[in-house]
Amino acid sequence: MSKELPEQASVVVIGGGVIGASIAFHLAESGVSDVVLLEKDELACGSTCKAAGGVRASFSNEANIAIGLRGLDVYSRFAQEYHQEIDFSRDGYLYLLSDQTNVDIFTESVALQNRHGVPSRMVTPEEAQKISPLISTDGLLAASWSPQDGKATPESVVMGYAAAARRHGARVVRHCAVTDIESTGGTITAVVTEHGRIKTDTVVCAAGAWSAGIGNMLGVNIPVVPVRRQIAFTEPLSELPESSPSLTIDFPSNFYFHPEGKGLLLGWSDPNEREGFNLKFELEDWLMGLGAIAETRVPAVLDYGISTGWAGLYEVTPDRNQIIDRSTEVEGLLIATGYSGHGFLMGPATGEIVRDLYHGKEPGYDISSFALDRFAQAGIGAGETNIV
């Protein structure tokens, strides 16, 4: 794709992951001319391509439930409407609970989800094992089962959105890093890239783990930090269950797995992982931590070797909820970042929300809890923490 940049654009979207691609499409589809999507590397090469692909509505607050439901709806029809196969399947999410406090929290969350049309339910350890046959029930008190949640292929979604954005007139430019954003009197005037300058009065920061750097170009504090997350793939299993959830999550430990080909995808969020842009896949120490959990929860995993794996980045905010907002400090800056591991499933709704913000319309979702200034109002870390 040509790196020739237009002299000007109505909107410049920074970040070619699922969030940025969805935003570019929804803006272009709504009639915004001269939308430019900039990606410093390949499309979906950042956090999106390292995502496990989970799509769910089983959240603990109404806003995220609505956003998750929209993701499930759009992805269920994506192949037909965007002419891009994304391998979408609805095999459910199963949360394993071994602490009474978490059982109580999930019981309340399930009731909330049910009120919003999500057919989740609490199940016994024995029922959980029937749903996900590889697990051990030792120490389990209960589980939460959301059968309509699912998974899809993140890179394919990005390609579908990018192609649709181009069909509506947007320009998608890869290998074009943003080096500065110019402003005058608190109003954006241009985006400077390694290949040239684009005059514009509107920028959308959808840069994921790199968003703080984009904010710094304008003197805006975007409290997003990168945290490494690793995923590994087992060798083929001789007795892979005929059916298994899209994700089985041991909630207290953040260990999760799902079938991938003839083996398993294994994920674990190491609580001792330091913040930073470390993308090195380091198996030994990580596997020791994961193995200690698997020995109790999914002992069959220990019988199989690891074939490959990768490291990616979560873009984490202090309360682990996303930022979707129009800046009050700099005119023309829109922000969609900080999804803390949920960006892929929230891509469809985010595109709609940012489109509406750009046009000055009230979004069809309650985004009041995703405002950027929630951290400044009561100190960094304020807000309801997204634990489910």
Image (cartoon, rainbow, N blue to C red):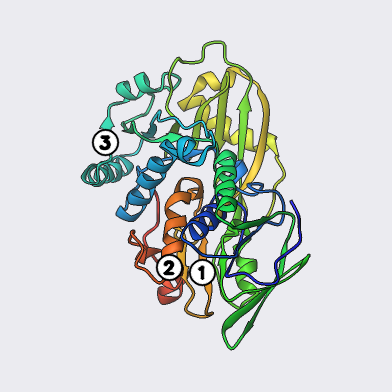
- Give the CA distance from mark 2 to mark 3: 31 Å
Q: Quadrant of residue 15?
A: bottom right
Sequence order check, earlier mark of 2 and 3: 3
Q: Position of residue 186 (x, y in %)?
A: 57, 85
Judge by depth and name the residue closer to the eye, 93 or 266: 93
Q: Identify the mark at residue 357; answer none if there is no mark.
A: 2
Which residue is labeled 3 in the image? 119
Q: Are marks 1 and 2 in contact (CB under 8 Å)?
A: yes
Answer with mark 1 or mark 3, whichever residue precedes in sequence: 3
Q: Nearer the viewer, mark 1 or mark 3?
A: 1
Task: Report the residue marked by disc 1.
Answer: 334
The residue lying at 40 percent from left, 53 percent from top is 386
Per the image, label 2 sits on a secondary structure element best described as: helix
- Image side of residue 188 versus residue 141, left or right: right
Q: Is residue 79 visible?
A: yes
Q: Amino acid under label 2?
A: Leu
The answer to whether 25 appears left or right of 118 in the picture is right
Residue with the most extreme right position: 195
Q: Pinpoint residue 62: horizontal percent, then vertical percent.
A: 30, 53
User: Disc 2 vs disc 3: Cβ atoms closer than 8 Å?
Assistant: no
